[in-house]
Amino acid sequence: MKKLTKNLQENISAVKEILPQEDVLVFPFSTAGGTDCAVVYTDGITDKNLLGEQVLKPLSAFAGKAELTALRQALFCPEVKDGGDLEECASGILDGDCLLLFDGIEESTLLGVKTLPARAVTEPPTDVAVRGPRAGFIEDIKTNLSLIHTRIKTPALRMKNLSVGKQSKTKVCLIYLDGIADEKVVAEMSDRLNKVEIDNIADSSYIAKILVNKPFSLFKQCGTTEKPDILCAQIMEGRVGVLVDGSPIGLSLPYVALQDFQSSEDYFINPYRATATRLLRFLSLFIAVYLPAFYVTAQLFKIQLIPTSLIFTIASGVQGIPLSPSLEMVLVLFVLEVLNEASIRMPKYVGYALSIVGALVLGDTVVQAGLVSTTAIIIIAISGICLYTVPNLYETTSILRWIMLFIAGSIGTYGLILFTAFLLYYMITDDNYGVPLLSPLSPWNANDNKDALIRVPLFFLWRRPKFFKSQNKRRLRHRE
């Protein structure tokens, strides 16, 4: 690695050779004592007002000796650190820091005077709560870390900073509590991130793919959230949080499937209502995946599964339909997926109009034309609505719905039973970082199930979840 010299002009030339970009600017000046200096910074991400007030003004008035310690003490900047070699200096400049060089001194100095464009902290669109905190993560990692700091004020809080991406040099921070999180999990996550060789990290989803054990798994392997209160609660349980610069999505590991059936609002409302809501989400997801497949297999193979009075209603609706039940359901589900994708990708106001046209005009027209039955549209509509009760599992459950539908149309009831058994076996045997995916249901743990599909009052949750292997088991003094 090339190091700096005592010649100011040589150092400036060496830096500009590494960073020939036009937005990397050099401003030379001199102190009152006659020492030649220069600052090198990136235009647009460096705060020029701070640079002038905290660096240029005090140094221009400095008349002391040309010693590094004395020159640094003259600065008003609170964030001052050694620049290191040329590569570290270049990396700091691109990160928004200002490089300060002195003639006759070979050591460099990096000053924290960056300013990055960032939106305000607002309520995230995916985790809306009626009760509880409404702050959400944004794309600036420093702001996100400050949201963590305001909620966890303990010396045990650890934030391990890493740089991932050969070209992007994206900041990644592992957040955990010393003495509570499993040190083996922290070490393994750090090792994976340090070993990976990738050019760019555009979002936290890239990091999630790196950290998971089974990247080809259909099921989710990493927890995601946009709310700092949720991530802090997971860190308190013994998990490791991950924040990525440029992404508003926080990650948490190890992951268990039941956490997506829980909401932060569950802990701010009556436990009976919270339990009912969690069971409703689970039932809705079951209906979303199995209802279209059950309808198809009942019509084709097991008509006796449908009540007699309902059979006559369905028969009158499907009379004259040219398509088989399976093709009819595939067609309606395909149209729903197309409308869903189009409404998301199109501009917001056009998307609203498209949803209305698709749901009302198109749906009514195809029924009147005799292409599909009213029953098929009602079933797909119910399935689509139920699917969004657990939005974090939408990707997995939407694929499972298609698989179930194809199995129901080709094999029938026995195919659905066998595939369900296979899914259960796969989920029971799956784990990440030593934590089973279906914990605490499998393996069963009575204490951890107090906050699984049901939620007991707060004072009965005095132990941390056992499956996270926390070093500190107690999180609440048990009420006598």
Image (tube, rainbow, N blue to C red):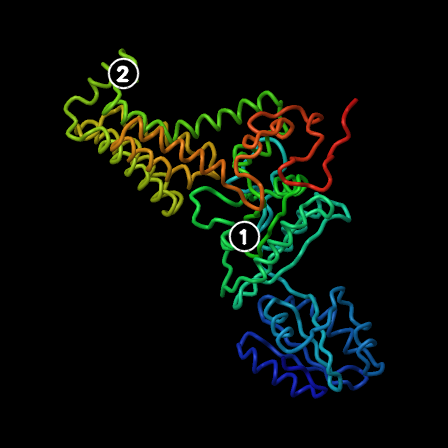
Based on the displayed image, in which of its 4 quarters is residue 141 positioned? bottom right
Q: Which residue is mark 1?
A: 211
Q: What quarter of the picture does the N terminus occupy?
A: bottom right
Residue, far top? 309
Label 1 crowd bin: few (<14), some (14–19), many (20+), radius 10 Å? many
The C terminus, quarter of image: top right
Badge 1 marks a residue whose secondary structure is helix
Mark sitting earlier along the chain (2/1): 1
* Residue at 78% over, 86% down: 34
The residue at which mark 2 appears reads as: 304
Q: Amino acid at mark 2?
A: Gln
Residue 166: image location, x then y, percent: 53, 67
Say how many tags the image has: 2
Taking depth in this image into account, of 188 and 284 the one nearest to the observer is 188
Apparent side of residue 292 relative to residue 267 in the rendered image (left or right): left
- Where residue 363 appears, as percent x and y from the top left, is 26, 31
Question: Gap between marks 2 and 1, in whole Å?
Answer: 48 Å
- Where's residue 340, x and y in %? 35, 40
Which secondary structure, mark 2?
helix
The residue at the far right in this view is 64
